[in-house]
Amino acid sequence: MVLISLLPILIVILLVAGIGTYAFKSNKKRHRTPKKMKWVVGVYFILTLVAAVLSYTVFPAEKTESKVISKEKTSQHDEAQSKIINSAINGKLPNLNGVFTKKESWNFPFNGKDLKISNKDEQDYYANVFVISKPKDDGVIEAAHYMGKIIIDGVDFTERKGSPHINVNESILRIKAPELVDVNFTRFSEGFAFDQFTGRQSMFSRSYFSVHGNEFILLKVPKSVRVNGDFNYVNAE
Amino acid sequence: MSLTDVTTWEITKKQYRYKLKSYFGVFSSLVAIQLLAILFSLNGTGMSGGSSGTFSYDVNYYTGDIIQVLVMIWAFITAIIITTKAYRYDDYSFVTNRLISHYSNILFLFSASILAGIMVFFTGHLFRLITILLKNTDSIMVSELTLLGTLKGITASILYIFLCASIGYFVGILIQLNRLFSFLLPVLFVGALFVDGMNNDPTVFPSIISFFGSENFLFLFILKIIMASALFYILAISFSNRMEVRP
């Protein structure tokens, strides 16, 4: 097993040794540098210089240095989100303190006495629904979608994810899943020698971290409305 | 008796200049190896992915690690090659002794390491450009380095290459001392890797790599590399005194 894992390394070493020895020795025999060889090295060096200029100017890929969220911060976001969700499931919705942000809100006029929340599972969408009973009967159902941060390997993708579609029809509140979001991105790093002294992850601690972003829908219903379905009543702190 | 007095340093400089011209082949092999490294790196060095409800992601990681490692191997091989008999005997076209020959070799390897380290940085950009043009992704994220970060990175890259060159130089001298080493050393190296990784928990090699790779202070890192390289060169020079004198 160990030998098999060493095999690619050995092949690469042999390959490099072969190229190195051949290029070096074939030149050495002549005792002076052939013009062609000088050209090859010169052209390659200019090519890499041009590539460096282009990669800084013409193709400035999205730079992340200012936006990268550290592993510690990511884990703090994850913990804070879980803490709030768990507290809300137990009936208390604490202060959101910027951990969750309101992405979208709706107001639905409602004069009925019973409200059914449609089964979310049918749509493969698992946002928690928390319900607050308003102190008065104002004939309006207020709905809001709250979203926690989505961080993939230090990059914030919260903006990419949309809100669900919510509507109330004949005393049924339907929640439809938002559009699917598929993010495909590429990250570059100059290599371990360059990461070692820049406070980035060293070659021994490279790990990929993410927080997928919790979300919930908060409904504020008139005092006399009875709610049925999959939800939790909460009291806002 | 000579009419002109020449100092050790003057001969070393002459030999060094001669070697820069005569050993130009190392730079063409460096180009070939860097192109090979770009080819190997194009497939990416890692990936991660996941999904949660209506959100899914794929992240591809591209690093210059392969370029750096292959150039380090190149430096190792190059250092071995310049210790071979044919190259050693070239030095005697000058008025010289073994020590001068070693000095000029070390100077040459240091110069080659500087050029290789700078080229690792620029080749990294060529690799990035090729990947941007070839890849079809939503976005490419680049953790851009500051000027100071770039300079520190290039310094580290040069020192890693120089360290490998010093190891190669020592190995080369050992092989010149006794041909048996050309068989023994690879066997010992692979054997040690095998034994160290037998219980799936290698400790010796990761500790050696960690000694340099986990150092976050540039000054200490420079010190460690200089000390280690000096040790290999001193050993190489002292072992070379046991070699036969040129007929």
Image: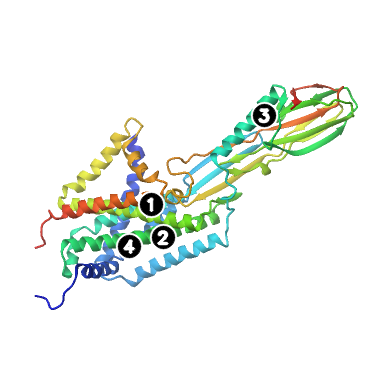
Left or right of A41 on screen, residue B171: left
Q: Could you say where residue A107 lies in the image, as x and y percent from the top left?
A: 84, 35
Chain of the residue on which disc 4 is drawn: B
Residue underneath mark 3: A84
Please, which residue is most extreme toward the bottom here?
B3
Which amino acid lies under the numbered mark 4 shown in the image of this protein?
Ser
Q: Are marks 1 and 2 on the same chain?
A: yes
Residue underneath mark 2: B119
Residue underneath mark 1: B219
Q: Residues within 10 Å of mark 4 (few under 14, many from 20)?
A: some
Q: CA distance from mark 4 to mark 3?
A: 59 Å
Q: CA distance from mark 2 to mark 3?
A: 51 Å
Left or right of A185 on screen, residue B8: left
Chain of the residue on which disc 1 is drawn: B
Q: Nearer the viewer, residue B175 or B237?
A: B237
Q: Residues within 10 Å of mark 1 (few under 14, many from 20)?
A: few
